[in-house]
Image (cartoon, rainbow, N blue to C red):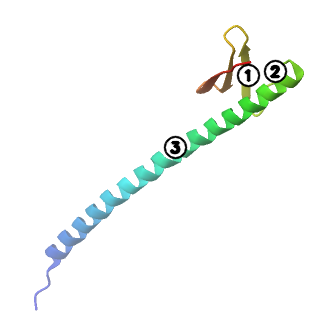
Amino acid sequence: MKKRRAETLAEFLMAALVFGIIMASTFEFIANHTEMIGKIKIRDEIMQQAQFSMDYYYSSGVLPPDRAGLTFELDNDKKTLTVSKGTQHTMTFAFKE
């Protein structure tokens, strides 16, 4: 019986190629969702700290000091609160009295 080495090598290369394509798409999917989860976590943290900041402002009349790596800026003329985490993540909240 004759051994079919070339055919076996071709089958192995095709299987490796298909596996590689599937794994690349899987890793890209996981990376995109991990990045999205990180952004959602920062957004939730900013919103929670903004609520704390406004509660603190209404009870004491001054903004709280920077906390949890966030900075607070209140503009009484425009009635807005800007909460920043670093330079990349900023949210502005408008409020009514």
Left or right of 17: which side holds 88?
Answer: right
Q: Farthest residue in the front direction?
A: 97
The residue that appears at 66% across and 10% down in the rendered structure is 78
The answer to which image quadrant residue 46 occupies is top right
- Residue that label 2 marks: 63
Q: Farthest residue in the bottom direction?
A: 1
- Residue that label 3 marks: 35
Number of marks present in the image shown: 3
Q: Is residue 26 above or below residue 35?
A: below
Check disc 3 and give the amino acid type.
Glu
Q: Earlier in the sequence, mark 3 or mark 1?
A: 3
The residue that appears at 62% across and 25% down in the rendered structure is 91
Left or right of 18: which side holds 74?
Answer: right
Q: Where, quadrant-wise, is the N terminus in this rendering? A: bottom left
The answer to which image quadrant residue 6 occupies is bottom left
CB atoms of marks 3 and 1 within 8 Å: no
Q: Earlier in the sequence, mark 2 or mark 3?
A: 3
- Residue that label 1 marks: 72
SS for tag 1? strand
Check disc 1 and give the amino acid type.
Phe
Q: Residues under labels 2 and 1: Cα distance?
A: 7 Å
Q: Farthest residue in the top direction?
A: 77
